[in-house]
Amino acid sequence: MQLRINGKTEQIEDIDNDTPLLWVLRERLGLLGTKYGCGIGQCGACTVLIDGEPISSCLVRVADLAGRQIETIEGLSNGQDLHPVQQAWIDEQVPQCGYCQSGQIMTTVALLRRKPRPSQKEVEQALSRVLCRCGSYPRILSAIRKLSQEG
């Protein structure tokens, strides 16, 4: 099976079609930025972009991904150059434990690509699918506000 991940074609051998994308990313490809949180699509820690849309990778079967574009947090930066969302997270000191942050970042990237200047309500709606147990929401919102003012 071939998957298109972060702009590269990855050949995945000996895999059951029902295997969740999350396990392929973490166990087969070593892309550990996508986190396992709940395994039932409720927490958003495993969010990746599939054809530009934020999706819980624990819910997607690899068999359903032929010809689709998958983007993980590892695909955002270009060498030492961080994606603007990643840099905003650093500038605003967003993470506490950091566990949800790849899901938060990927969801924010999708939102800002779709709407560079989202309203507060649109931001809250988009991020409502990614839970942060540490409560770093005020810093997340601050980072997104700064990005949308620059965008």
Image (cartoon, rainbow, N blue to C red):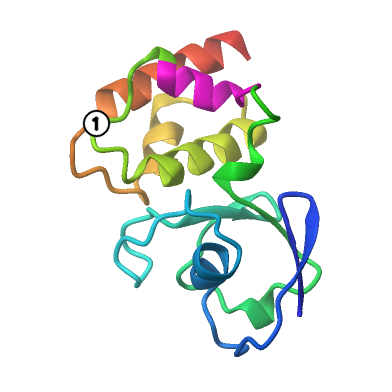
Residue drawn at point x = 70 percent, y = 30 percent? 78
Residue at which label 1 appears: 96
Residue 36, position as x, y percentages in the image: 37, 62
Within the image, what quadrant is residue 126 found in?
A: top left
Residue drawn at point x = 31 percent, y = 38 percent? 98
Within the image, what quadrant is residue 125 found in?
A: top left
Within the image, what quadrant is residue 25 found in?
A: bottom right
Q: Is 35 left, or right, of 97 in this rendering?
A: right
Residue 104, position as x, y percentages in the image: 42, 40
- The number of numbered discs placed on residues in the rendered structure image is 1
The quarter of the rendered structure image containing the C terminus is top right
Q: Is residue 100 above or below residue 25?
A: above
The answer, for residue 15, to whether it is visible in the render is yes
User: Magenta segment range?
Assistant: 81-90
Q: Nearer the viewer, residue 82 or 122?
A: 82
Q: Is 49 left, or right, of 134 in this rendering?
A: right
- Reply yes or no: does residue 118 show up in magenta: no
Q: Is residue 12 above or below residue 78?
A: below
Residue at far left of view = 134
Q: Nearer the viewer, residue 114 or 61?
A: 61
Residue drawn at point x = 67 percent, y = 78 percent? 64
Residue drawn at point x = 56 percent, y = 43 percent? 73
Q: Main secondary structure of the magenta part?
A: helix
Q: Is 67 left, or right, of 116 in this rendering?
A: right
The quarter of the rendered structure image containing the N terminus is bottom right
- Categorize mark 1 by other alpha carbons within 10 Å: few (<14), some (14-19), many (20+): few
Residue 146, position as x, y percentages in the image: 47, 12
Secondary structure beneath dot 1 equals loop
Q: Is residue 45 above or below residue 142?
A: below
Q: Amino acid at mark 1?
A: Gln
The answer, for residue 118, to whether it is visible in the render is no
Residue 8, position as x, y percentages in the image: 79, 54
